[in-house]
Amino acid sequence: MRNMTQQESQNLEHKTSLNYKAIVKSVVAFANSQGGRIKVGVNDDDQIIGIKIGIEASIAQKNTASFDSKVLTETSIDDISLPQVKDFLTSIHKNYNLHSYLISRNCVKQELTPTVAGILLFEKSPQSLLVQSHITLVDCT
């Protein structure tokens, strides 16, 4: 069996807590270099330890627009692969109106302008619009 532990490097940071100042410092460093990843709730040995979010962090998160909800004004609903959305809805056995579903999941805004989330999830070629962005799925079971 292969050891999947990842040590910190110039492209990987481990953060044991949701310390915004430390995270922003790492984000700026990665933005000024080749990019990187930040794992929050992980210790230096790459073990998942989780995080506790206090009331202050919850309030700060509610008052801050997330990156994935940002509208990409240079895009349109034509950049979303509606057949891909339909296939996804079929796979989860949901019979939604496509546009209503995309709006309810914050993939597009009311005027049908895609958000970062919509582009990452359902764009035909998301890397062409969001070069440094990607989705990583972590299974913690």
Image (cartoon, rainbow, N blue to C red):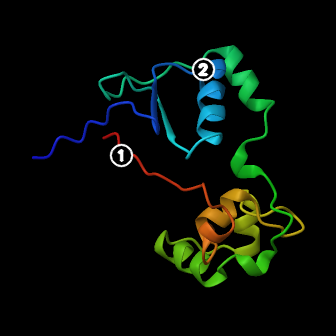
Residue at the image point whose x is 80% and y is 71% from the top: 75
**Can you tell which mark lies on residue 102?**
none
Tag 1 or tag 2, which sits nearer the N-term?
2
Q: Nearer the viewer, residue 18 or 85?
A: 18
Residue at the image point whose x is 80% and y is 61% from the top: 72
- Seen in the picture, residue 40 relative to 70 is either above or below; the reply is above
Residue with the most extreme right position: 111
Write down the residue under mark 1.
Answer: 139
Could you say where residue 3 lies in the image, as x and y percent from the top left? Answer: 17, 40
Residue with the most extreme front position: 33
Query: Which quadrant: the C terminus?
Result: top left
Could you say where residue 23 lies in the image, as x and y percent from the top left? Answer: 60, 26
Res 42 visible? yes
- Seen in the picture, residue 8 relative to 20 is either above or below; the reply is below
Residue at the image point whose x is 72% and y is 29% from the top: 61
State which quadrant residue 78 falls in: bottom right
Q: Amino acid at mark 2?
A: Ala
Residue with the most extreme bottom position: 83
State which quadrant residue 125 falls in: bottom right
Mark 2 or 1: in front is 2
Q: Is residue 127 left or right of residue 108?
A: left
Q: Is residue 122 left or right of residue 100?
A: left
